[in-house]
Amino acid sequence: MSRLLDRVLGWEGSTRQIAILRFAMGLIIWAEYAQKHAAFRNHAPGDLLFGAVLVTAAGCMAFGLFSRVATAVSALCMVYGYHYLGVHLGQKEPFVHAHTYVLMCTVVFLAMMPTGRSLSVDRWWALRREERGGPAPVPEWAPLWPLALIRLQLALVYFWGAIDKTNVAFLSGSRLQQMYYYYYGSHEGVRLPFFDELMTLGGIATVVLEYGLAFGLWFAPARKWLIPAGIIFHLMIYLSFPVGTFSVTSCVLYFAFFAPATVHAWFGRMAPADTSV
Amino acid sequence: MSEMTPATRIVRLVLFVGLVAWMNFGPFYRQVLDGDNQHMREFRMYGTRARRTCQVHFEQKQKDAWKPVSRWEIEGYSFQKFPGRARRMLDKPKDALAAGRRLCGALGEDSELRYRMRCGHVRDGWGEWDVSEDLCAGGGR
C-alpha cells in the first residue's frame, strides 16, 4: 500500500494528456454555464460578473492562455458556485448537480498540474521565444499525481451510481419504466414491443456496466471493451433523458485512464515532426 | 524524472489522502448514512424526478369481457404529439378518475369503464394493482 502510494505521489509523465483534458473541460464549462449566465437571463451585477469571470477563465483555460492562472480561477469559480451560491445560498440551478460536481472536481484537480506545458498558447509563445534566441521552453513533463484523483472521481461516480441502483426497483426495470413514462408522456405513449422486458434488460445491463466501469477502467485489457461500451451507454442516456453535460464529461474523462506515455506517442504518430508537406 | 523533496512528499500526501477521503465520504454519508448535508455529493440517478408515477390502464366491458381502451388515442395523442406533463400523466387516483370521466364522455355514458392502476416510487418499484369500480356509473375510489 505504501509503495503504491509512493508511486502515485511521485508519478510524472507527459503533459499532453492533461492538456487535452484542460481543453475539453474548458469547453464543457462553456457549454454548461455560458448560456445560463447570459446577460439577457440574469441582470444581477454579481451574477453577471461571476458568469463573465468563469466563462473568460474557462476560455483561457481551454486554449491554454495563462493556463495555470486560468485553470485556478475556473476551479475557484466552480467551487464558489457549487458550495456557496448553490448549496449555501440555495441557488441549486445551475450549480448543484452530479455532473457539475464532477466537472468541478476535474477542474480543481487540473488546476493542481501544469496543464499549459502542452498544446497551449503558452507553449506556442514559449517556442516562439526560443526561436528568437530566448530560453528553451520547459519540457512537456510534470508531476501527474492529481490525474489519479481525476480517474478515481469518475470510478466513484459509477460505483456509487451502481450502489444506488442495486435494488429490486431498478433491476426489475420498473424504475426505468417510470423514467420513460415521466419523460415520454405516459405508459400509453411508450408503445415499443417487449417494452417491459427491454426495461428489465436495460436495468440489469446498466448496473453491470456501471460496476464494470468502476473497477474495469483501471485495467488496460478491460478498457478496450469498457470504453466503447461506456460511450454507447452515455450516448443512449444523452438521447433519452436530460443529463446536462454529464455524458460528454464522462466520455472525455475516459481519456484520463490511458497511460500518459501512450497519449504522448499517439501525437507523435499522428503529427510527426517532419512536416514536408 | 525529478526527485521529490520530503516537504513536497508531505504536501502531496496530505492533499491526496484528504481529497480521496472527501471524495469517498460524500457518497457514503449521503447514500449509506442517509445524511442530508448538500456539501457532500451523492451519485443517485434522478432522485428528484419521477418520484411518484402511476401506470393506468383503462378497460371497457364489451360482451362480458374487459377490453383495453387507449386514453392516449381517444384523446388524440400520438408519440409525436402529446400534451404537457400535467395533463398526460396520471399520478394520483383522482387524476385517473378525472381521465376516466372524460373517456366516459367520449365512449358514451352507458359504457362500463374501469381502470387498473399501480403506482411506483423512486426506491420501491411498482406497487400493487388497484382496480376501480365502473367509472361511468360514478364509481372509482
Image: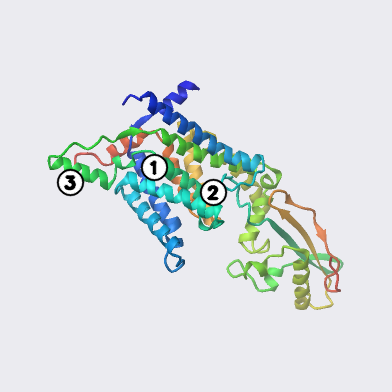
Reply above or below: A125 against B6: below
Q: Chain of mark 3?
A: A
Which secondary structure lies at badge 2? Answer: helix
Q: Chain of mark 2?
A: A
Task: Measure the C-alpha gap from mark 2 to mark 1.
Answer: 20 Å
Mark toward the start of the polypeptide (3 vs 1) = 1
Q: Nearer the viewer, mark 3 or mark 1?
A: 1
Could you tell me the amino acid type at mark 2? Ala
Q: Give the residue number, with chain letter if any, for mark 1.
A: A111
Residue at 39% in and 52% down: A27
Task: Measure the C-alpha gap from mark 3 to mark 1.
Answer: 37 Å
Q: Chain of mark 1?
A: A
Expressed as whole percent of the image width and height from the top left, the position of residue A182 reads 64, 60
The reply to whether discs 2 and 3 touch (Cβ–Cβ < 8 Å) is no
Q: Give the residue number, with chain letter if any, for mark 2.
A: A98
Is residue A250 visible in the rendered image? The answer is: no
Quadrant where the N terminus of chain B sits is top left
Could you tell me the amino acid type at mark 1? Ala
Is residue A42 visible in the rendered image? The answer is: yes
Q: Residue furthest top?
A: A3
Residue at 77% in and 78% down: B105
Could you tell me the amino acid type at mark 3? Val
Residue at 34% in and 41% down: A115
Residue at 41% in and 35% down: A258
Expressed as whole percent of the image width and height from the top left, the position of residue A187 reads 68, 61
Mark toward the start of the polypeptide (2 vs 3) = 2
Q: Give the residue number, with chain letter if any, for mark 3.
A: A277
Which secondary structure lies at badge 3? Answer: loop
Reply above or below: A93 against A25: below
Mark toward the start of the polypeptide (2 vs 1) = 2
